[in-house]
Image (spheres, rainbow, N blue to C red):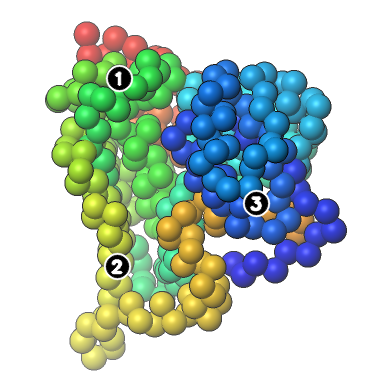
Amino acid sequence: MADNTNQSSPLTVVLIGCGRVAEKHLKAISKLKGLELKAVVDVNPESAKRLLGSVKGFANVKIYNDYKLAIEEIKPSIVSVTVPSGLHFQIAKYAMENGSNLLLEKPMTMSVSEAREIFELSQKTGLKIAMGHIYRYLPIVGLVREDIAEGKYGKVTHGTIYVRWGHGEDYYSSAAWRGTWKSDGGALMNQTIHAIDLLVWLMGSEPEQASAMIAQRVRNIEAEDLGMAVLRLENGALAQIEGTTATIPSKHTAEFSVFCENGQLSMGLDSGKPHLNIFTVKPNGKTKKLNGYYIRKQLKEGGLFSYKCALNPHLGIYKDLQDSIISGKDPIADAYAGFSSVDTLLGIYKSAKEGKPVSLPLEDDFNSVDMTGFFN
């Protein structure tokens, strides 16, 4: 993922939503040649001013409070959407109907039908969608996936993830939409969808069945603060999922593991510190650690730029989208990834609601608001 873009004029960007994650977008844009931020949009002008003042180089960027007007006047190459999840669909659809590519934070939408519509609109128009599935852009992940897909480690048996991303009441009370079924979802939809996307992607097969339970343990929200699920993939492998915000906020941890007949990968974050362990079984039965091999290979193929993405994965997402627009290739986390992750997550919710396994992809529409009243 070397920085070797040679376009004649910069790709223009309009950023819609000036909340927590928006600063990561600005930092990424500031480090990439060939991108020009033309405007930010927020219903609160003070939020927009604060955002532009947080990163050097954006003092002259326009501020709008109407995303439609910003898109119509600027006609940007890229619209970046960082608003609450319940607003994703209407903004994404309008942007694409007016000719803009998308960088869309997760989840793509809050319903299966809307996610399918956005995916199909991308297919119809040829416009690119890069999803904010940040874990796909971490160093070494893509290289390991390629080797798993090529059968280097034999049959994939199963995978596991846990995301223990504690948030206190201050997090949820900071905005009325947080933790609601309509606009946000719970620990699985908001904090864990990144990890579900990564696990399924690494295991190389689409989910065909979901079984799940969700609970409210300690957080005063409408949706769940704890969810557990098992996915059966089309290749027969099983994936186990745990996602929660009911843990200590200062001890954020996430762990991803994939197990194969001749190898295994475990990687994650613990209070901001990354760790990685990759092992294979040699023909003589001895175990060999492959961390060094993949680190050297990543440095050779991606250079130091790929490791900068570990500090801010949005740098990798923007560079990948930029390259995709120019070359015509699909982004690493593309429109189908956005649709598939929404379908899987809502399948998990539907299983929890109905108290039985459900088949994937879902045949009928299912919306996060269909979970309203689940805990009453």
Q: Position of residue 222 (x, y in %)?
A: 29, 16
Query: Disc 1 marks which residue?
Result: 173
Mark 1: amino acid: Ser
Pointer 1 and pointer 2: residues touching (CB < 8 Å)? no
Q: Secondary structure at mark 2?
A: strand
Give the residue drawn at x 30%, y 61%. 274
Mark 2: amino acid: Leu
Give the residue drawn at x 36%, y 73%. 153
Mark 3: amino acid: Leu
Label 3 neighbourhood size at 10 Å, few (<14), some (14-19), many (20+)? many
- The answer to which image quadrant residue 168 occupies is top left
Horizontal relation, residue 349 to residue 136: left or right: left
Pointer 2 and pointer 3: residues touching (CB < 8 Å)? no
Query: Disc 2 marks which residue?
Result: 276
Task: Choose the circle earlier in sequence order: 2 or 3.
Answer: 2
- The answer to which image quadrant residue 193 occupies is top left
Task: Choose the circle earlier in sequence order: 1 or 2.
Answer: 1
Query: Can residue 108 be seen by looking at this rendering?
Result: no
Q: Position of residue 236 (x, y in %)?
A: 35, 53
Q: Position of residue 61 (x, y in %)?
A: 69, 36
Give the residue drawn at x 43%, y 60%. 310
Task: Choose the circle earlier in sequence order: 3 or 1.
Answer: 1
Query: Disc 3 marks which residue?
Result: 321
